[in-house]
Amino acid sequence: MKKYLKILAITAGIQIISFCLFYLSDRLLTNSMLPVCIMLSGIIVSEALGIILPIKWCSTKKQKVLSIIFLPTNYTLLFLVLSVVFFVHGLLDILTQIPDNFG
């Protein structure tokens, strides 16, 4: 359990730092893709460490698999993609309900 919490703390820390850097650079650099690249690279590094660290630190195969599956930071990219999909789907629903003779 200690190893799981260490891995969770490392991966969550990386993601929190990347989100903070995203918001800071988004305020400073308008109309730039650099903040998005910072955030996505932080998430990818965190997810890679969320897979690599349990393989190296856990002793049994069962601990390795359970640590990888139940680590919540490994699902952040999936959550972001689903959020974008649902947002775009909602926008398309709003646009299709606009009448043809609008404006």
Image (cartoon, rainbow, N blue to C red):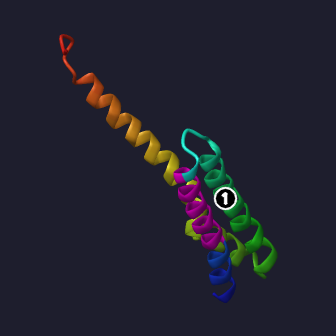
Q: Quadrant of residue 51?
A: bottom right
Q: Residue at x 19, y 15 (%)?
A: 103
Q: Main secondary structure of the magenta part?
A: helix
Is 94 displayed left or right of 16 in the figure?
left
Q: Which residue is mark 1?
A: 42
Picture coordinates of residue 31, whole percent (x, y): 55, 38
- In the rendered view, tell whether residue 18 sits above or below residue 6: above
- In the rendered view, tell whether residue 50 sits above or below residue 43: below
Is 67 or 95 nearer to us in this picture? 95
Picture coordinates of residue 88, whole percent (x, y): 40, 35
Q: Which residue, as the protein is rendered here, is positioned at the far front?
A: 28
In the image, residue 40 lies in the stretch drawn in magenta: no
Query: For the magenta stretch, what is the residue range?
Result: 11-27
Amino acid at the residue labelled 1: Gly
- In the rendered view, tell whether residue 97 sits above or below residue 78: above
In the image, residue 22 lies in the stretch drawn in magenta: yes
Q: Residue at x 62, y 76 (%)?
A: 8
Picture coordinates of residue 57, whole percent (x, y): 78, 79
